[in-house]
Image (cartoon, rainbow, N blue to C red):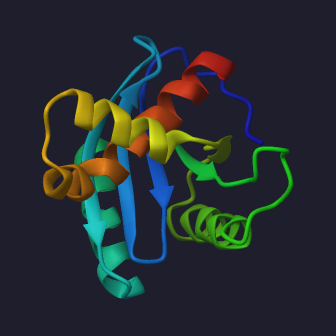
Amino acid sequence: MPTITAHSGTVMGFDYGLARIGVSVGEIALKQAHALMVIASRVNNIRFTRITALLEEWRPVLLVVGFPTHMDGKYHAMSAHAGRFARQLRGRYHLPVCMADERLTSLDAQDRLQQGGLSIRRTKQVQDAVAAQLILENWFAANT
């Protein structure tokens, strides 16, 4: 895992899924994250074109990818996929990439959105971005 030496700079978080990737953005100095968007595509070229555009716009100093595990910490079926995605990000963009525990972030995101009054349909459209926000917030709490 990369050592964080910067006291400021933008960090981008990802909640990786086979059909959707939630994206968040945050600032190291503020230790705050915000849901940004959901990339809804299974096509890698489309996914990475959108990620490239986001990286050019936000200029992050670090990327954080949620690492799914079971509640007991054992690897999940998606663990290998998320790890591969993290390696692809590192290889394509030459930025440091950290993995962060993402247990329960999707459920927490769903609860937050429904408590905020969003319909089930709208919740499903933004849930992955909010999960990415929670992944980044948890990473800030543990690492900065």
Q: Work out whether 50 lies above or below 100.
A: below
Let me know if residue 60 appears in the view: no
Q: Quadrant of the C terminus?
A: top right
Image point 52% across, 37% down: which residue?
135
Q: Where is residue 35 in the image (x, y as percent from the top left)?
A: 29, 39
Is 129 on the left or on the right of 89, as rendered?
Answer: left
| Quarter of the rendering containing residue 133 | top left
Let me know if residue 83 appears in the view: yes
Is 120 on the left or on the right of 102, as rendered?
Answer: left
Q: Position of residue 52 (x, y in %)?
A: 33, 65
Q: Nearer the viewer, residue 2 or 117?
A: 117
Q: Work out whether 104 lies above or below 53.
A: above
| Quarter of the rendering containing residue 11 | top left
Label total for image: 0
Q: Work out whether 140 lies above or below 59.
A: above
Q: Position of residue 96 (x, y in %)?
A: 62, 47
Q: Where is residue 46 in the image (x, y as percent from the top left)?
A: 29, 82
